[in-house]
Image (cartoon, rainbow, N blue to C red):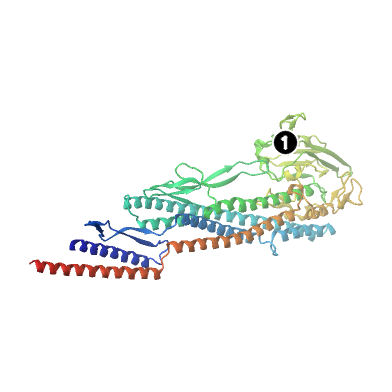
Amino acid sequence: MFNSALQIGRSALNASSLGIQVAGNNMANAATPGYSRQSATLTPSRDARFGNGFVGRGVEMQAIRRQVDSALQNRLLGSIAAEQQSQVDLSLLSNVEGTLNELSEQDLSTQLGAFFSSWSDLASQPGNRGARSLVIQQGRGLSTYIRSLREGLADQQAAVDRDLTANTNRANELLSRIADLNAAVVTAENGSGNANGLRDQRDTLIAELAQFMDVTTLEQPNGNLDVLVGSTPIVQAGVSRGVRLKTENIPASAGQPASLRVVVSTSDNNETLAVRSGRLGALLNQRDSLISQTIDRLDTLAAQLIHQVNRIHATGEPGQPTSSFTGSFITRTADVTRAINDPDNLSFLELRVRPTSGSFMVNIRNNATGELQSARIEVDLDGLVNLTTPGFSADTSVDSLRSDLNALANVSAAVTSDGRLNITADTGYSISFSDDTSGVLATLGINSYFDGVDASNIDVRPDLQANPSALVTGRRVPTGATDPWARGAAEGDIVDNGTSLAIAALADRGLSELGGLSLGEHWEETANSIGVRTTSARTSANAATVVRESLDAQRSAVSGVSIDEESISLLNFQRQYQASARLISVVDELTQNLLTLVG
């Protein structure tokens, strides 16, 4: 009997001692990030029969469990990923908005306005050298600003790529450590109990991983925790599949240059992962939907600016007789004889603005007599052979243009060794162009104002920078002209400020290529869109933080340590320990008395 009582006291001592350790461990880790409160579960030992009844045999420590709500944990992981995504979105949008710097005195809209205003000023005094120089300087300033703006956006894209690499490397480290902890948990528990410290470490790493990508977890019966992105596992048992960045090539298409798309894939078999949130998700999305699209819209604006200004300038009337023009556009040797609209003609394929079917006039003047002869050059780019059969063999190429120009009297044309079209009048003759409905002269850079094809290389033609007097201001009135600059002038007359007025009018002219918007409106729409997205991202970031903080508070209510509660628990186990020690002391005293009586 006394032996049973001693065993009861012993079990109580052990249980209360473990309870004190658990409470003490909780208090020691009250401020430890990621620590989950542990609780000791006590259960009565199996009763023993004594006569017709049952007598208790003490207490057992059944388990020491972490206080964790698995469903809440997964919701918290999702909120962490969403918060990180919204913060990255806001940061990138704010950076792009700051780069554009709209609504200031140093923005692209202001530069465009100043450029077109300089043409308007030139129209009022077309022979003024100072006004001509101002047009050149404004064009150079606009070109420099556009190139600088694109470089700033490209730098941000490069920074995003560097962040993607760094974040992917960190995610890989976390995945490897999680896999190692999976193995350590299984080994430590060996099918029974919970290795609570190891599990807390694993949960902390998974919470950090959620900052980079949207992950969910699935616990296996043996203690392993599988980590998944969408439905794809990236950690299984003690093995990490790893993640890496994969670059996919997007080939060039009509009007669109070749580009690269970056995705995240598994390292072991290159399986693409659907990473939609977290830092990686935000960086991947904004790289393509924000920065790349902004660069694309800037390139589109620059390409249209180049083409529309060059189209007018190329068909203007030079202020002084000009006998030779060499285009600025370089055609690859293999493409000289290919139709301009042939998909295999890589020189023209990626251009954002390409020529269309139409024609242009070549005007040849005899400088001695003033006699003018005009000839129309047809440009066929309909992609048809004999008007019915699809094909490009009958369409216009740079070489066929050269041949057609060579067929004109007192004109010769050639393709230079570096792929530029040269058009030269015979000695004693000068040449000009008018009524280009195809846009081919602007594309080839014949008598152009701008060089380049998009925002990366736009600039004023070098010889215009050196000689502003070569700037074209006049314009020959074509057949059926209805433009404001031609009012009051007869067909064939030269209006000495017609080109200046036509280019100045581009400031407000809606372009079908831009959906009916003017150049300024197109860019204003771009800037406004980014401003709206930035405001929305700021709201989303604040909301995501509130949600994460709320879930974090719920987790703390379930898994956090309360010093007050642990102090009470510590006192209870202390009293239990003291009572158990007293029980053992009493049983020992009774046993001694019994031995004395027996002896």
Could you say which is closer to the camera, residue 130 or residue 580? 580
Q: How many marks?
A: 1
Q: Is residue 495 visible?
A: no
Quarter holding the C terminus is: bottom left
Q: Is residue 134 visible?
A: yes
In percent of width and height, residue 576 lies at: 29, 68
At 51% across and 44% down in the image, what residue appears?
Answer: 272
At 52% across and 61% down in the image, what residue appears?
Answer: 548
Would you name the residue on which mark 1 appears?
Answer: 397
Quarter holding the N terminus is: bottom left
Vertical comparison of 390 with 532: above or below? above
Quadrant for residue 257, please give it: top right
In percent of width and height, residue 51 lies at: 21, 57
Could you say which is closer to the camera, residue 347 or residue 246? 246
In percent of width and height, residue 280 lies at: 52, 53
Say few, some or many: other residues with alpha carbon within 10 Å of mark 1 (under 14 / 14 to 19 / 20 or more).
Answer: many
Callout 1 secondary element: loop
Q: Residue type at mark 1: give it.
A: Ser
Quadrant for residue 150, please give it: bottom right
In percent of width and height, residue 515 lies at: 74, 49
**Farthest-out residue, left:** 599
